[in-house]
Image (cartoon, helix red, strand yellow):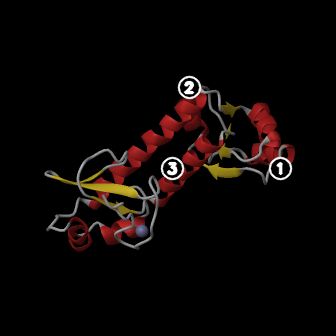
Amino acid sequence: MATPERSCIACRKKGGKGELIKLADTPSGVVIDYLEKLPGRGAYICAEDACMEKGLKEGPLSRAFKHKVSPPDADAFREELRGKILRKIEGIFGIAMKSRQAVWGFDAVASAARRARGGLLIVAEDISEGTERKFMGSAPGSSYDTVHYSTKDGLGSILGASPVALVFIAEPALAAALGREIGRLKGISRG
Ligand SMILES: [Zn+2]
């Protein structure tokens, strides 16, 4: 069996497993096959507004699936995709917590960040300027990636804790997966 080529139906960018979003052609229409589990022919698309706007149309979808396909409702599709990405993000946080690979709270995160060789610092979007400045002074880091994501309340609720402004994940595979999913989420605007 030939390896199916994965390239975005809108911009033609190629991507490996987990990089592009898989679409599946089902009797009830084109659906998001986020976990890549559905049988049959797949098509791939970047998790980005521009590609979804261009690609989720009858022409590109019909070419990809080799028969006439009606495009899904774009807003509903974006909302569904955001929901799937959010669940995936929560799942990764869950795994990181269970395997004790996530730390939060100012001192624990600063200490993990100072020791880090790689990893991901997650900063709540509503962190106070003072706290962020203090953190940068305490653990200036170029050895790890930083993303701004969610709010203190949002991170706290994911972690089952009171509001959390800073989270650090050192384990490389989890850090990379989380960074990728957060990047995807930021590429898609709300419907
Ligand atoms: Zn694309």
Q: Using the image, determine if residue 14 lies above or below residue 168.
A: below
Is 39 positioned to the left or the right of 155 in the image? left
Q: Position of residue 132 (x, y in %)?
A: 76, 46
Is 69 positioned to the left or the right of 104 in the image? left
Q: Which mark identifies residue 36?
A: none
Q: Quadrant of residue 121?
A: top right
Instruction: Give the residue drawn at x 43%, y 46%.
Output: 85
Instruction: Give the residue drawn at x 62%, y 48%.
Output: 125
Location of mark 1 (residue): 140
Q: Are marks 3 and 2 in contact (CB under 8 Å)?
A: no
Q: Using the image, determine if residue 74 lies above or below residue 173.
A: below
- 162 or 105, which lies in front? 105
The furthest residue to the right: 137
> At label 3, which amino acid type do we have?
Glu
**Cα–Cα gap, marks 3 and 2:** 20 Å
- The residue tagged with tag 3: helix, strand or loop? helix
Q: Which mark identifies residue 160?
A: 2
Location of mark 3 (residue): 181
Q: In the picture, which quadrant includes the C terminus?
A: bottom left
Q: Position of residue 115 (x, y in %)?
A: 82, 40
**Cα–Cα gap, marks 1 and 2:** 27 Å
Q: Give neighbour class at mark 2: few <14, some 14-19, many 20+ (Cα, 10 Å).
A: few
Ligand 1 closer than 8 Å to label 1 CB: no
Q: Closer to the observer: label 1 or label 3?
A: 3
Rendered-image quarter of ligand 1: bottom left
Is 13 positioned to the left or the right of 137 in the image? left
